[in-house]
Image: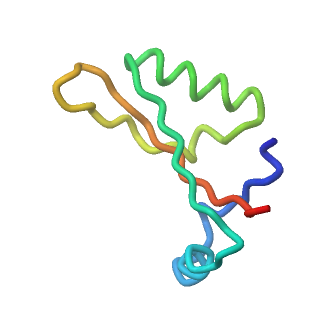
Amino acid sequence: MYHCFLESPNTPTVERESVLQNPERERLRILVIGSRDGVIETIHDLHRRGFAEVGLWSSLLPVPSSGEVMSILTRDRRRR
């Protein structure tokens, strides 16, 4: 499943912009929302499963008016 994703977090900005303009690519955002411990545990679990490196996720961000936090992973995938 994860073989469809392109590793692009360290790609220079100019190359990232060309990926965004390429109709063969699609930008995806994966959100994990919940308690602080739940979000951290899920990110580490996904890392153990080979889905994404822990460092590719955003820092924990507060979810307004809920007491929860979220983290976002942005990936590009090849369109089929």
The residue under the point 73% across, 54% down is 5
Left or right of residue 34: residue 52: right
Above or below for 33 versus 4:
above
Above or below for 64 versus 4:
above
Quarter of the image with the C terminus in it? bottom right
Q: Which is nearer the eye, 72 or 25?
A: 25
Q: How is the image coloured?
A: rainbow
The residue under the point 45% across, 44% down is 58
Left or right of residue 43: residue 46: right
Q: Residue furthest left?
A: 65
The residue under the point 66% across, 41% down is 53
Q: Quadrant of residue 7?
A: bottom right
- Residue 41 percent across, percent down from the top left: 55, 19
- Residue 6 percent across, percent down from the top left: 72, 60
Above or below for 75 versus 78:
above
Left or right of residue 11: residue 39: left
Count the labels in the image. 0
The residue under the point 37% across, 35% down is 60
- Residue 48 percent across, percent down from the top left: 74, 27
Quarter of the image with the N terminus in it? top right
- Residue 68 percent across, percent down from the top left: 30, 22
Left or right of residue 36: residue 62: left
